[in-house]
């Protein structure tokens, strides 16, 4: 309990520091994840890529990305814009928002300013958000650059930002990482979240509609009221168009369940194709949610179930959840034991997980 309380206090301090760094302006958005959401999903929603979950660890005092704090809102830091005020200098702005006036050079570079003396009141400056990284044993500045920039190239920038001459680091040392990712700009983050909320709303509506149609189709057919016989007496009861009582069959005599709307397999196929398009566009979590809804419906043909589980496994590999992906491949092979993947078009990472599911060495 003491440890949990300490984590909560650390998270509160981090959140407060974000607001204070913004000079009273919000540079971080609050987001309450659903119980089954992962940190990768939160990053996908806000930053457009699941691998950017690293942006969320330090601001929320999260050490294990696979275990989100239950029932707690997360801070989603963003790159924002500051309007220069009268009396501001790049040094004072850097001291206020980047923790060191000597980082004015970084603001010059980021905002492509040639002469700092030309900055006037009203000028808009891009301000990054900072990540506090504690160095692990064996890490160098190159490792830190790869972790947060996904490339070793900005290692030199990190050295200058932290006043280092070499890439060597000591375990426990603090490195400040400025995140200036254009995809993390506050306007883009808001737009991306809005699109996600709209997509989620549509998926919920589709799920309700599917459930409603399934309930109607499952209801016992009500006995149709008897229709007056208006057929000629000579009508043959052996005629294909005649009813068992010798009367001409009418549309009203067909049970409602048999005149149901669109067949369930066709709807399921459309949703699976939609999920594949989401996967192809990098919307892995949305594709996963769509496929889970289709699979849980339990009315899939074997071919559709196999396709749904295959795409779901692909999504899980992309989200870094290889163990779950392996389980989905196992379920796929239970449906279609001779299923294979094309080694030319399938990524080696996916093939490796698939081979493990098959029990290969």
Image (cartoon, rainbow, N blue to C red):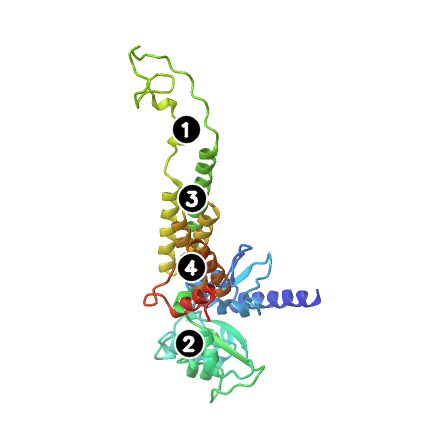
Q: Earlier in the sequence, mark 3 or mark 2?
A: 2
Q: Quadrant of the N terminus?
A: bottom right
Q: Earlier in the sequence, mark 1 or mark 3?
A: 3
Q: Mark 1 Cα within 10 Å, few/some/many (few <14, many 20+)?
A: some
Contact between marks 1 and 4 (CB within 8 A): the answer is: no
Contact between marks 2 and 1 (CB within 8 A): the answer is: no
Mark 1 → mark 3, Cα distance in angstroms: 22 Å
The residue that label 4 is drawn on is: 284
- Extreme residue in the right direction: 2
In the picture, residue 260 is in which quadrant? Answer: top left
The residue that label 1 is drawn on is: 256
Residue 192 position in % (x across, y down): 41, 58
Compared with residue 292, is residue 263 higher up or lower down, i.e. above or below?
A: above
Image point 35% across, 59% down: which residue? 280
Residue 122 position in % (x across, y down): 40, 67
- Extreme residue in the front direction: 238
The residue that label 2 is drawn on is: 107
Assign a secondary structure to mark 3.
helix
Q: Nearer the viewer, mark 1 or mark 3?
A: 1
Contact between marks 4 and 2 (CB within 8 A): the answer is: no
Q: Earlier in the sequence, mark 3 or mark 4?
A: 3
Q: Earlier in the sequence, mark 2 or mark 1?
A: 2
The residue that label 3 is drawn on is: 206
In the picture, residue 225 is in which quadrant? Answer: top left
């Amino acid at each position: 309990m003491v440890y949990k309380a300490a984590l909560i206090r650390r998270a509160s301090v981090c959140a407060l520091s974000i607001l204070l760094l913004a000079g009273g302006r919000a540079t971080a958005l609050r987001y309450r994840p659903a119980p089954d959401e992962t940190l990768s999903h939160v990053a996908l929603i806000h930053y457009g890529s699941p691998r950017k979950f690293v942006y969320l660890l330090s601001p929320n005092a999260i050490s294990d990305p696979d275990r989100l704090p239950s029932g707690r809102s997360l801070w989603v830091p963003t790159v924002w814009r500051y309007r220069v005020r009268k009396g501001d200098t790049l040094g004072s702005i850097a001291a206020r928002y980047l923790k060191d006036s000597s980082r004015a050079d970084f603001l010059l570079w980021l905002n492509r300013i040639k002469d700092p003396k030309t900055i006037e009141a009203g000028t808009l400056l891009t301000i990054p958000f900072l990540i506090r990284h504690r160095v692990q044993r064996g890490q160098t500045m190159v490792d830190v650059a790869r972790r947060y920039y996904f490339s070793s190239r900005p290692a030199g920038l990190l050295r200058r930002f932290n006043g280092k001459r070499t890439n060597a680091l000591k375990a426990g040392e603090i490195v400040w990482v400025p995140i200036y990712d254009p995809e993390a700009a506050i306007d883009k983050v808001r737009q991306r979240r809005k699109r996600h909320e709209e997509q989620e709303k549509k998926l919920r509506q589709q799920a309700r509609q599917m459930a409603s149609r399934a309930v109607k189709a499952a209801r016992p057919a009500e006995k149709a009221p008897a229709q007056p016989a208006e057929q000629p007496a000579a009508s043959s009861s052996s005629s294909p168009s005649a009813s068992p009582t010798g009367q001409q069959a009418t549309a009203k005599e067909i049970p409602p369940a048999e005149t149901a709307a669109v067949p369930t397999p066709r709807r399921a196929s459309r949703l699976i194709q939609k999920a594949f398009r989401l996967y192809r566009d990098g919307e892995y979590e949305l594709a996963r949610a769509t496929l889970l809804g289709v699979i849980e419906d339990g009315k899939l043909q074997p071919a559709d179930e196999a396709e749904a589980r295959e795409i779901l496994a692909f999504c899980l590999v992309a989200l870094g959840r290889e163990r779950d992906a392996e389980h989905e491949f196992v379920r796929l092979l239970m449906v279609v034991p001779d299923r294979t993947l094309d080694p030319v078009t399938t990524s080696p990472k996916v093939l490796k997980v698939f081979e493990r599911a098959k029990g290969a060495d």
